[in-house]
Image (cartoon, helix red, strand yellow):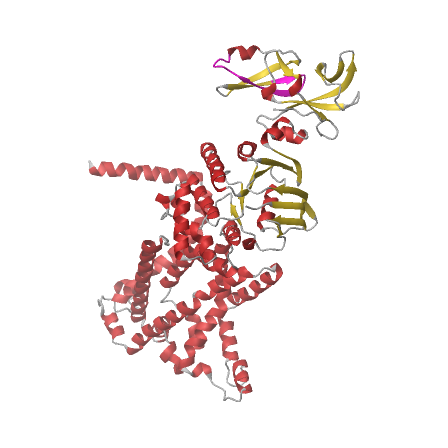
């Protein structure tokens, strides 16, 4: 009986889906490439995740390699380099969050205050541009700019009669350089989503505030920021979900053994373990750990946000 | 209380002039309604008074002070917007208090004012709610609360009721009227709804195409429209307009509308042969002949029943005409109406070319 009762709604749901599909098949067709992409690049590789719990050898293949339980995780957590990579990931991500997250919001608020249309458009284009430059070239620019001999930074330091610093070999300089490069590259592009949110604010809210006597500063604090708060929170949740994913290519391109102590993150560690040392199983375990932490973080952030601000990603 | 004086106010956007020199004096405590079709410049005029639009030319005075270059906040006006303009992230009390907080009033003063306003508008039970949790009527009341809490010199209303359904609109209209009686503040109200204009206004300003067509009390506009535009805009349904020619016959001066004659007083300022528009309000047409009335033969198309009244849609020759009659609970006899009567003293005459009324005051 119970099963029959359950079966009916399911059947109804199915037939409703079929109806939808028949009416709007073009939309589902457009969705198809993304679904295929996700299956091929995100779901199928999940099959390989099991090697995190196996003594994997390329010759035996994924299925035939023997199970070893949590051995690789034990190896990892007794490895100082891995622990250091976790610590570095968290520190760099925290700095990114602290400085990199507000940057596009501030930029968007500033753009919003520019009244001259041409000036605004030009300024926006200029700050969007770095986003479209390949990471390799960005790393090249950074390396050149901070070079001890010809770099613009050291040249300027020289004007004050100070000795030049070989920034990229100094562990204490890596994080500031990395984080500010990230801001320079992405803040402009990241501001688009906040500008769109600001554009969506009902203009009569501002007019009403003008009549009430609010200054532009007050309008920004009391209208613009609260109005775009839902967008800010959604972006923050996404950001927290990606906290373990620091820009891997840029680190690979900028770090060197001298700066590993502050620059080596989980992803670069996985890369070295997996591809350079051929320990695929240990690398998979490290990657899986990363993913689990990210999953927990995004779930927590979303739940908290839903509870306290009625805004959530899902 | 303050007056508002507009002297030859012009609004230009680049080369396009949308308001062509408006002159209007609004007395202290007066409730003035700007009414007109969309795009007639009424909202633009209101926004210029508020300071949200720059005045391209002319002079605006509030309380005998020229305010052309004065910031909106220093004009001491409050505005109620069509879409309420409530802050979604603030509750009702905070929304009402917004203007006071911006002006850094004391906490005690703010609390007292908010609770007073909540009391006046019946919002006390909702003070802690967010706008999203309120009905349309309640939101509109909060918007008014935000305006009255500051006790401004002048209230400006920009179509505040057009987002409400018909029933609520009638209710809020009465509330605005009561509120104005209670507070007695100078008010300028913009609407495209002539019923709102008629019911609320001390004086109505009818605007069309960036110009003022007529200013007057609701009854004055109804009885003595200055031109065919006002005749067609004020009143629901609008005044019937029939084209005719002035003739001199043995019976005296007449307006001839394709064979139907309308007697004119000898003193009427018209020339024989002048093309005129004969205007007669639907409610002034009668099913019964009286001593001085013209007989209008009609062919009836449709009877619209409104309950106590009915609208007869008919044609005179080719021209559509509407007659509003009382039903007295029965509409059967209305389907056989063949002719209606226009009392001579209620017929209006307009010059066809200029559209202007040919002077003949009708006293209500």
Count the labels in the image.
Answer: 0
Q: Vertically, is B35 above or below A197?
A: above
| A309 to the left or right of B143 | left
Q: Where's the C terminus of chain B, which quadrant? A: top right
Residue A268 sits in which quadrant? bottom left
Q: Position of residue A128 (x, y in %)?
A: 53, 64
Question: Which residue is found at the position 50% from the left and 76% from the top?
Answer: A142
Specify whether residue B324 is painted magenta.
yes
Is A295 or A73 nearer to us in this picture? A295
| B58 to the left or right of A305 | right
Q: Is residue B41 visible?
A: no
Q: Position of residue B153 (x, y in %)?
A: 54, 48
Q: Is residue A289 visible?
A: yes
Question: Which residue is found at the position 39% from the left and 52% from the top?
Answer: B111
Q: Position of residue B5 (x, y in %)?
A: 63, 45
Question: Which residue is found at the position 47% from the left and 69% from the top?
Answer: A183
* Span highlighted in magenta in the image: B314-331
Magenta segment, prevailing SS (helix, strand or loop): strand
Specify whether residue B100 is painted magenta.
no
Q: Vertically, is B309 above or below B182?
A: above
């Amino acid at each position: 009986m119970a099963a029959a009762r359950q079966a009916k709604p399911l059947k109804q749901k199915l037939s409703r889906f079929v109806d939808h599909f028949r009416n709007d098949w073009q939309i589902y067709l457009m969705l198809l490439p993304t679904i295929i992409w996700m299956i091929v690049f995100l779901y199928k590789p999940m099959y390989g995740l099991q090697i995190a719990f196996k003594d994997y050898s390329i010759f035996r293949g994924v299925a035939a390699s023997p199970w070893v339980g949590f051995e690789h995780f034990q190896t990892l957590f007794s490895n100082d380099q891995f622990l250091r990579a976790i610590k570095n990931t968290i520190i760099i991500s925290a700095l990114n969050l602290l400085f990199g997250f507000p940057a596009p919001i501030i930029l968007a608020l500033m753009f919003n205050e520019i009244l001259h249309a041409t000036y605004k458009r030009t300024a926006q284009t200029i700050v969007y541009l770095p986003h479209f430059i390949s990471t390799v070239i960005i790393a090249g620019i950074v390396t050149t700019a901070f070079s001890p001999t010809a770099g613009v930074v050291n040249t300027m330091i020289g004007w004050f009669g100070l000795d030049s610093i070989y920034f990229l070999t100094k562990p204490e300089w890596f994080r500031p350089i990395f984080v500010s490069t990230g801001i320079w590259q992405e803040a402009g592009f990241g501001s688009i989503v906040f500008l769109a949110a600001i554009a969506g604010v009902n203009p009569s809210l501002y007019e009403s505030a003008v009549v009430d006597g609010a200054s532009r500063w007050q309008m920004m604090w009391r209208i613009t920021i609260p109005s775009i708060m839902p967008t800010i929170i959604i972006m923050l949740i996404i950001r927290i979900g990606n906290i373990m994913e620091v820009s891997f290519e840029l680190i690979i391109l900028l770090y060197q053994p001298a700066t590993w102590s502050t620059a080596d993150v989980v992803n670069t560690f996985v890369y070295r373990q997996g591809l350079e040392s051929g320990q695929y199983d240990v690398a998979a375990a490290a990657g899986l750990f990363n993913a689990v932490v990210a999953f927990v973080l995004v779930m927590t952030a979303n739940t908290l946000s839903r509870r306290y601000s009625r805004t959530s990603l899902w | 209380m303050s007056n508002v004086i507009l002297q030859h106010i012009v609004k230009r956007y680049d080369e396009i002039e949308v308001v062509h020199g408006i002159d209007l004096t609004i007395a202290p405590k007066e409730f003035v309604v700007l009414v007109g079709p969309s795009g007639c410049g009424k909202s633009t005029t209101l926004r210029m008074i508020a300071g949200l639009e720059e005045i391209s030319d002319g002079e605006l005075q509030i309380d005998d002070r020229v305010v052309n270059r004065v910031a909106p906040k220093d004009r001491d006006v409050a505005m109620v917007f069509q879409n309420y303009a409530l802050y979604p992230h603030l509750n009702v009390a905070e929304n009402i208090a917004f203007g006071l907080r911006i002006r850094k009033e004391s906490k005690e003063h703010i609390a007292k004012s908010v609770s007073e306003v909540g009391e006046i508008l019946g919002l006390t039970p909702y003070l802690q709610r967010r706008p999203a949790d309120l009905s349309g009527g309640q939101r509109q009341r909060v918007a008014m609360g935000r305006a009255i809490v500051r006790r401004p010199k002048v209230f400006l209303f920009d179509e505040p009721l057009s987002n409400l359904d018909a029933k609520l609109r009638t209710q809020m209209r009465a509330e605005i009227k009561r509120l104005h009686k209670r507070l007695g503040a100078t008010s300028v109200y913009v609407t495209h709804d002539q019923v709102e204009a008629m019911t609320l206004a001390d004086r109505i300003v009818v605007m069309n195409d960036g110009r003022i067509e007529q200013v007057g009390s609701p009854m004055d506009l109804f009885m003595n429209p200055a031109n065919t535009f006002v005749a067609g805009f004020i009143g629901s349904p609008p005044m019937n307009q029939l084209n005719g020619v002035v003739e001199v016959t043995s019976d005296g001066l007449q307006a001839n509308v394709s064979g139907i004659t309308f007697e004119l007083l000898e003193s009427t300022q018209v020339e024989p042969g002048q093309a005129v528009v004969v205007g007669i309000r639907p409610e002034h047409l009668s099913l019964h002949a009286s001593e001085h009335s013209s007989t209008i033969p009609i062919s009836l198309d449709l009877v619209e029943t409104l309950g106590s009244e009915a609208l007869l849609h008919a044609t005179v020759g080719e021209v559509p005409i509407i007659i509003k009659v009382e039903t007295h609970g029965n509409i059967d006899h209305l389907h056989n109406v063949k002719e209606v009567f226009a009392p001579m003293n209620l017929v209006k005459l307009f010059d066809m070319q200029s559209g202007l009324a040919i002077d003949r005051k009708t006293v209500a």
